[in-house]
Amino acid sequence: MPKKIILTGDRPTGPLHLGHYVGSLLNRVRLQDEYDQYIMLADLQALTDNFANSKQVHDNVFQVMLDYLAVGIDPDKSTFLIQSMIPQIPELTTYYMNLVSLNRVVRNPTVKTEIKQKKFGESVPLGFVTYPVSQAADISIFKASLVPVGEDQLPMIEQTNEVVRAFNRIYNCDVLIEAEALIPKVSRLVGTDGKAKMSKSLGNAIYLSDSADDIKKKVMSMFTDPDHVRVEDPGKIEGNTVFMYLDVFDTDTEEVARLKEHYQKGGLGDVVLKKRLVEVLENLIGPIRERRENFAKDPEQVRKILQQGTQKAEAVAAQTLQEVKQAMGLIYF
Amino acid sequence: MPKKIILTGDRPTGPLHLGHYVGSLLNRVRLQDEYDQYIMLADLQALTDNFANSKQVHDNVFQVMLDYLAVGIDPDKSTFLIQSMIPQIPELTTYYMNLVSLNRVVRNPTVKTEIKQKKFGESVPLGFVTYPVSQAADISIFKASLVPVGEDQLPMIEQTNEVVRAFNRIYNCDVLIEAEALIPKVSRLVGTDGKAKMSKSLGNAIYLSDSADDIKKKVMSMFTDPDHVRVEDPGKIEGNTVFMYLDVFDTDTEEVARLKEHYQKGGLGDVVLKKRLVEVLENLIGPIRERRENFAKDPEQVRKILQQGTQKAEAVAAQTLQEVKQAMGLIYF
């Protein structure tokens, strides 16, 4: 039996950070053995709210690829593809656009929230409003049956499946398949400010490409317990970013439990804790950084991996599009 | 100096009729000597409100092609292309979608009117709402500087030029060129019911593929002057469909003037007039029908013309898309 197809990816708007690592990258390293995994560098989607920074989006594709390879996503097991190089995706999107009403897409909760967050005001670009339809094409053109997404992205999978069902019904076929959301167990990593999820735009991220020095600086300025002024004061664990990170990244859970107890009693300084976290993170990111630098020294190899993956993905997309056109009776020659 | 590029075409929703002949086809036969003329069989656009009838749209492409060839549009002078076979059009549309706001497109007067006419109600398909953006891609991907359109389509040209200017400004280039509307002098041909413009959906059309019998039946039941009951009654010219048609199609203008005088005085029956119109129309459509039947006997030849034109058009579209991606800095390999 062929492996199930899984589609995942990122909008190349910047280098990847620990939030990506915990939330998706680690998962992808695991999933690539069990599934036929497609990883999309979603530059078209990134452009929907970065169209004026297209050159950066282009450059970020390579930066994100370095992150992927550095964390151990294996081009022999996973297929990397550049979205804008698969012309079948916009083609399929065009057909899908007739199967989704304007009202339906404007009601999409994810899009609604994002439009507010991004402060488009009166001038939301059409590309942004319609990206769930484009995403339906991304997923279904590869016949992915699994898509790892956060809970906030569930309406996207719903929209995809609505389109898939509408297409199969209207054209009386079973060309397209529905996808299932794969919701990761890991909760979102909070940013270094302890306030919101880690994100480039909030400036609270530790990147997989950060230097040892960057990591040190970011950890040393982390939010802990504002009432923990002197070493001898008892400190709070709840809402303490350093402990949140230790819980996620420190493999010596017994020692972390001991430190928590000590901290709560008083007599354990933030600096000691932060130094420990610096070490833990450097032990994690150090080897990633090193592999990243090695791949960066051979951009031709990286380009080749991207090119081969994209070619393979395009062949799959072309096959699905052909089936779609056949079902619609739109083959001319 | 290379010839100016003109883009024109039709939505293949049915065979072409005398309204098309007067309003655009005759013009195309004239324009093909002076311009580099691209004629688009706009199946993607037809699908925006005919997605459930895709097989018919497919078949109509060939029917419309027969009409084109039968009226004398020459494949050696004009380039015929099937829209859905130019993948660069949806690709370019995707980039354009980021440059047009939802509000802008919803305000488009042509789209607004059409949405009302087509009675979509609450479920206007996205494809229909966004078709002006797709049309901007149709026009600009061929770098057309002239587009023959009716006055009601002027907002489409405006939308195209807005996108073109936005693209050139944002990406600091001059890749795209603005288009000018070429508004035909001929006023719209009224339908056989004398009420509205000739249109398939109103069932008031005389087709270029109609048999002599069809023409006779349609003319004999034409709307004239309801108060002209007996032959000896004086009749009205105004609003008299038969005279409107004679004005357009009868080349013997002196005789038409004489008939008008006679009709107004009284003593000239509708049947005499209608018989004259039947003859005039049969003289026009007869040879078209014959050429059409000859082309229909050789579908391979028609397919070859379509295929060659589409291939030529795709090469032009690929070149423009490459320039577009270069301007955006989106070339990866």
Image (cartoon, coloured by chain):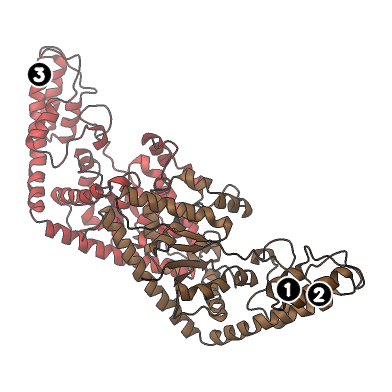
Chain colours: A red, B brown
> Residue B202: which numbered mark, if any?
none
Residue A179 can be seen in this image? no
Instruction: Check residue B246 in the rendering and tell me which mark sits there, or answer none.
Output: 1
Tell me the chain of label 2. B
Report which residue position mark 2 lands on: B259
Mark 1 vs mark 3, foreground winner is 1
Of mark 2 and mark 1, the one earlier in the sequence is 1
| Structural crowding at the residue carrying mark 2, measured as other residues with C-alpha within 10 Å and reported as few (<14), some (14–19) or many (≥20) | some
Check disc 1 and give the amino acid type. Answer: Leu
- How packed mark 3 is, by other alpha carbons closer than 10 Å (few <14, some 14-19, many 20 or more), is some
Q: Are marks 3 and 2 on the same chain?
A: no
Residue under label 3: A269
Q: Chain of mark 3?
A: A
What residue sits 44% from the left and 49% below the top?
Answer: A159
Q: Is residue B234 toward the left or the right of residue A15 in the image?
A: right
Spatial CA span between label 2 and label 1: 10 Å
Q: CA distance from mark 3 to mark 2?
A: 109 Å
Give the x, y percent position of residue A199: 25, 36
